[in-house]
Image (spheres, rainbow, N blue to C red):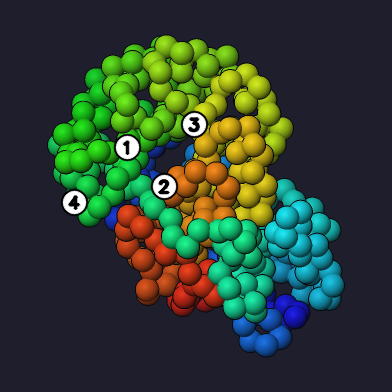
């Protein structure tokens, strides 16, 4: 099997509502989908969705790396393109002899890794998750996401999610006065008609004093964890925050490789790692990091990076392959007003992990000129 055609498909999609984070509000999201076509006409797709609005990789960096990768993929023969297809415990991965630009762009590497996996899985007639792990789950649960500012809007949004069957809700916090965040957490609790787990995501929006103040007053058995709570996420400060409040600490952008994982784990500064494929470099790298975290007794959560149906499907398949306890997946990209495919799934509490490849995805995008 060879790659006969490489397409880079840019997108810019509006959100249903402004996306509020500690870094500000986002009203639209840009990124790229890569489509690889093999000599038999099969297509594999992957997404490069860098988190550029929060200090992450830029769209320009990802675009340059993708175009360099497209040229490189077109030059390579079958042996090079599929080099080291079985990596470690039978995990397919992208080639090791990558162009410099691609090595510097985890979002671009994610797109190529995902597209190759999709192509390989379609050729094998199985889901990507099964290609990543023989023990992959056939379905995953998802958390609901609440991003509203006013407490009464938070309560209504949370109530709709609870009524739809969600058992875990993620609430974006920080960027508001401490008293307002306390009211917003209380609003989620008022919406609960059954046992509910609440995840808080501060996007590094608090200092230690503010985080301690808010979390100490909202702490409870229903708080699953707080994600990236501190503006300066030093291990000692994170450990202090957990000891003061009893709330588990989750880290996202602070952990991009096993060296980061070791640093925070040794200092007892993390309980949960949150994996975004575009940040760590794709499903294969994410799975290796998840395995290392599970071996240290840490919980692992896989989420998208506010991505299209392509990135969301990749997150679902990767989550299904992660060892250890099954954790609800976060799929924020379901908040797009439109998507890159007309049959994009809406947020649901349980998602089937089906194939072949990533499952049915019909793109409406055109190649970049």
Question: Horizontal and vertical percent for residue 182?
Answer: 25, 23
Which is in the foreground here, disc 2 or disc 3?
A: 2
Question: Horizontal and vertical percent for residue 12?
Answer: 45, 61
The mark that comes first in sequence, 2 or 3, is 3
Q: Where on the picture, by quarter, is residue 159? A: top left
Q: Is residue 136 above or below residue 235?
A: below
Label 1, label 3: how far apart the Cα atoms are = 15 Å
Label 3, label 4: how far apart the Cα atoms are = 27 Å
Q: Which numbered dot is residue 137?
A: none
Mark 1 in CB contact with mark 2 (< 8 angstroms): yes
Q: Residues within 10 Å of mark 4 (few under 14, many from 20)?
A: few
The mark that comes first in sequence, 1 or 2, is 1
Q: Residue at x 45, y 45 (%)?
A: 327
Residue that label 4 marks: 163
Q: Residues within 10 Å of mark 2 (few under 14, many from 20)?
A: many
Mark 1 in CB contact with mark 3 (< 8 angstroms): no
The mark that comes first in sequence, 4 or 2, is 4
The mark that comes first in sequence, 1 or 3, is 1
- In the visual, does 97 lie left or right of 231? right
Question: Horizontal and vertical percent for residue 229?
Answer: 45, 26
The mark that comes first in sequence, 4 or 1, is 4
Question: Horizontal and vertical percent for residue 116?
Answer: 67, 68
Visible residue check, residue 280:
no
Label 4, label 1: how far apart the Cα atoms are = 14 Å
Q: Residue at x 20, y 41 (%)?
A: 194
Residue that label 1 marks: 197
Q: Residues within 10 Å of mark 1 (few under 14, many from 20)?
A: some
Q: Is residue 33 above or below residue 169?
A: below
Residue that label 2 marks: 328
């Amino acid at each position: 099997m060879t790659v006969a055609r490489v397409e880079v498909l840019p997108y810019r999609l509006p959100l249903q509502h402004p996306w509020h984070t500690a870094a500000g509000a986002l009203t639209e999201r840009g990124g790229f989908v890569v489509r690889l076509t093999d000599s038999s006409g099969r297509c594999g797709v992957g997404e490069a969705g860098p988190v550029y609005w929060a200090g992450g990789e830029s769209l320009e960096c990802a675009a340059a790396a993708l175009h360099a990768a497209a040229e490189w993929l077109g030059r390579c023969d079958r042996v090079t393109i599929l080099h080291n297809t079985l990596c470690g415990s039978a995990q397919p991965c992208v080639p090791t002899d990558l162009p410099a630009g691609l090595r510097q762009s985890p979002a671009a590497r994610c797109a190529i890794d995902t597209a190759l996996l999709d192509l390989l899985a379609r050729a094998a007639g199985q889901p990507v998750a099964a290609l990543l792990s023989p023990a992959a789950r056939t379905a995953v649960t998802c958390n609901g996401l609440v991003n509203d500012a006013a407490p009464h809007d938070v309560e209504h949004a949370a109530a709709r999610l609870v009524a739809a069957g969600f058992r875990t809700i993620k609430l974006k916090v920080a960027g508001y006065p401490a008293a307002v965040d306390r009211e917003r957490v209380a609003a989620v609790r008022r919406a609960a008609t059954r046992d509910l787990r609440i995840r808080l995501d501060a996007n590094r929006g608090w200092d230690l004093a503010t985080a301690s103040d808010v979390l100490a007053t909202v702490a409870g058995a229903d708080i699953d964890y707080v994600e990236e709570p501190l503006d300066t996420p030093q291990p000692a400060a994170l450990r202090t925050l957990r000891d003061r409040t009893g709330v588990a600490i989750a880290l996202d952008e602070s952990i991009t490789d096993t060296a980061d994982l070791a640093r925070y784990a040794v200092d007892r500064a993390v309980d949960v790692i949150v994996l975004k494929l575009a940040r760590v470099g794709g499903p294969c790298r994410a799975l290796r990091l998840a395995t290392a975290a599970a071996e240290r007794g840490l919980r692992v959560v896989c989420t998208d990076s506010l991505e299209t149906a392509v990135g969301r499907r990749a997150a679902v398949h990767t989550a299904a392959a992660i060892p250890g306890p099954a954790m609800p997946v976060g799929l924020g990209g379901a908040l797009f007003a439109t998507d890159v495919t007309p049959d994009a799934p809406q947020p649901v509490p349980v998602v089937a992990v089906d194939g072949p490849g990533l499952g049915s995805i019909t793109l409406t995008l055109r190649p970049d000129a």
